[in-house]
Amino acid sequence: MKQIVIAGATGLVGRELVRQLDERREVEFTALVRRPGTLRSLSGRVKEVVFDYHSDADLARLGTEIPCDLLFCAIGTTLKRAGSPEAFRDVDLGIPAALIHRLAQLPEKPHFALVSSAGANHPRGLYLETKAEAERVLVDSGLPYLILRPSLLLGPREEFRLAERLSAIFLARPYLAAAKLLAPQSRTIWRYAPIQAEQVAKAMIWTCLENPPGTGGKVLSGLALHHPIMAG
């Protein structure tokens, strides 16, 4: 029975991870949360653990009190919600780095799957530079890893974001329809194609459970993220 831990389980991708893992009887999964009871509508199997990412004592529970063969990290925020560049980096870099450093201390190295962003391989600006730094921390850690680089995420958010809603209606859906019809296998076209959060979670779970990266690492982006079986 594989033990999976989810960080960021109440977010757009995280909630999809909880919902889809509920159907996988070969795993047990734990969500690290601030308040318990928020995920019961998605899964009756999820174990919620109240967790403070800035607490050394809580971090020390990972791999001991909280079994962890595989950690899914879907932590993320926005500059507006964080309130400052420093607070943004604390969430999108500081939290993944703390989790990575803790798991790297364990004798048996868990796999670590990180939701990053399209463009992190050629970063410009605070958002992508922060994502790129988080990727480097993971790659340098020695943990077996999977990095996912989705473009614009589509799906129902609890937080209303007007710009993303308008982009989804007027740009994302027409772009996806054209890509599927005119260039279904073009790596260039699919590199920045919008993607449903449901598909990101599906690719994350399928790759880690059915086609794991072994002792090294793997990056899914573009066409391979939309169709992860093609990355095999």
Image (cartoon, rainbow, N blue to C red):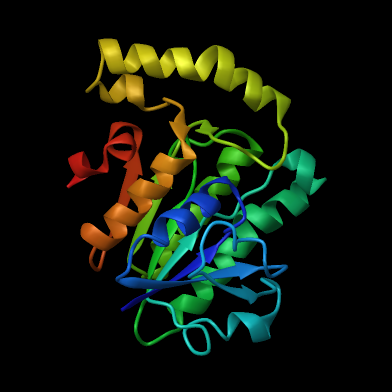
Instruction: Report x, y in % for residue 89.
Output: 68, 52
| Residue drawn where x is 48% and y is 40% of the image | 197
Relative to 47, 57 lies left or right: right
> How far across and how far down the image is residue 67, in percent?
45, 83
Residues 136 and 197: in front is 197
- Name the residue at 76% across, 52% down: 86
Count numbered badges in the picture: 0
Is 93 positioned to the left or the right of 100 in the image?
right
**Residue 136, relative to residue 67: is it above or below?**
above
Position of residue 229 in the picture relative to residue 105 (left or right): left
In the image, residue 111 lies at what x, y percent?
A: 36, 68
Residue appearing at x 37%, y 76% in the figure: 69
Above/below status of 188 relative to 222: above
Q: Nearer the viewer, residue 65 or 1?
A: 1
- Say which quadrant the N terminus sits in: bottom left
Against 6, residue 160 (above or below) is above
Q: Is residue 198 left or right of residue 2?
A: right
Quadrant in the rendering for residue 183: top left
The quarter holding residue 195 reads: top left
Residue 57 position within the rendered picture, expressed as x and y whole percent measured from the top left: 66, 86
- Where residue 34 sits, quadrant-wise, is bottom right
Foreground residue among 50 and 126? 50
Can you see residue 189?
yes
Q: Does residue 118 show up?
A: no
